Image (tube, grey):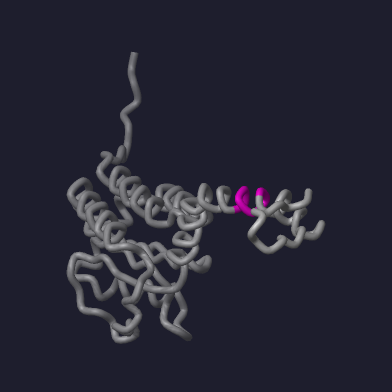
C-alpha cells in the first residue's frame, strides 16, 4: 500500500513488508498480551505474596512467658501480615476461653542446629503453666509440625484430636493457607477439650 503525501511535502518512503507485518500482526498480539497481564495481575500478586508468606520467619503467640535462650530475638521477622497474626492471637484467646486451657502457637523454623521437637518442648516448658498448656509449633517452609501438651491438657485432648488437627494444618500448609489452618486447629482442639469425657457407662437394665 503506497503512502501519499501532500504536494508540498517530501515523498514518504513506503514501509517494508516486515514493518507492515509488525503493525498488522505484532501490534494486536502485543495489545492482547498486555490485556491478559492486566487481568491476571491480581492473581499473580496474590500467588507471589502467598509464596513469600510461607517462608522462613518466626513469631510466637503465647499468654506471657520468658523466651528460652535458644530463641534469638532477631528471628522475630515474619512475612505474615499483622492482620494474620492478630487473627491467630484472637483464635488462641478464644480457644482458652472455650476450654480453660492456655494455647500457644509458634510459627516459623527452629533455630539452626536445634531439633524441632526439642525446641518445641523448650518453648512449652517456658510457658507460665506448662501442665495445662497446649503448644503448636509449625514451620510453613518445611515439614516440621509439633504438638506439646501438658499432663492436664493431655487428659482433656486425646491423640485422635491432635492427629485431626495435624492433618488440617498439613492440608492448609500445602495450599498456602497456614494461618487459616492453624486458626481452625485451635478451634478444633478447644472444642474437643471442653466436651465432657465419659469415664464409664452403667449398663441399661430392662
Quick one: which residue is furthest to the right in this view?
Answer: 17
Image side of residue 177 versus residue 4, left or right: left
> Residue 206: horizontal and vertical position, in percent?
34, 13
What secondary structure do most residues of the magenta stretch adopt?
Answer: helix
Q: Total number of numbered labels?
A: 0
Say which residue appears at 29% left-offset and 69% top-offset: 60
Q: Quadrant of residue 200?
A: top left
Nearest the camera: 46 or 191? 46
Query: Residue 142 versus residue 130: which sits nearer the camera?
Result: 142
Membership of 29 in magenta stretch: yes
Residue 190 position within the rendered picture, expressed as x and y whole percent measured from the top left: 28, 48
Magenta span? 28-33
> In the displayed structure, does residue 60 sit left or right of residue 96?
right
One can see residue 116 in this view: yes
Residue 25 in the image: state x and y as whole percent.
73, 50
Residue 187 is one of the magenta-drawn residues: no
Which residue shows up at 31% across the image and 77% down it? 76
Residue 103 visible within the image: no
Amino acid at each position: 500500500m503506497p503512502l501519499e503525501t501532500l504536494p508540498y511535502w517530501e515523498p514518504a518512503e513506503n514501509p517494508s513488508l516486515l514493518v507492515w507485518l509488525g503493525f498488522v500482526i505484532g501490534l494486536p498480539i502485543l495489545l492482547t498480551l498486555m490485556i491478559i497481564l492486566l487481568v491476571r495481575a491480581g492473581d499473580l500478586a496474590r500467588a507471589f505474596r502467598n509464596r513469600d508468606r510461607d517462608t522462613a520467619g518466626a513469631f510466637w503467640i503465647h499468654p506471657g512467658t520468658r523466651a528460652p535462650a535458644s530463641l534469638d530475638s532477631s528471628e522475630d521477622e515474619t512475612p505474615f501480615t499483622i492482620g494474620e497474626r492478630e487473627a491467630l492471637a484472637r483464635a488462641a484467646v478464644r480457644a482458652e476461653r472455650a476450654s480453660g486451657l492456655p494455647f500457644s502457637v509458634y510459627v516459623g523454623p527452629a533455630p539452626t542446629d536445634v531439633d524441632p521437637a526439642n525446641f518445641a518442648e523448650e518453648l512449652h516448658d517456658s510457658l507460665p503453666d506448662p501442665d495445662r498448656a497446649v503448644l503448636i509449633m509449625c514451620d510453613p517452609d518445611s515439614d516440621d509440625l509439633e504438638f506439646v501438651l501438658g499432663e492436664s491438657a493431655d487428659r482433656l485432648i486425646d491423640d485422635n484430636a491432635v492427629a485431626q488437627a495435624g492433618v488440617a494444618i498439613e492440608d492448609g500448609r500445602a495450599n498456602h493457607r497456614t494461618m487459616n489452618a492453624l486458626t481452625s486447629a485451635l478451634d478444633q482442639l478447644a472444642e474437643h477439650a471442653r466436651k465432657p469425657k465419659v469415664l464409664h457407662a452403667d449398663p441399661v437394665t430392662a
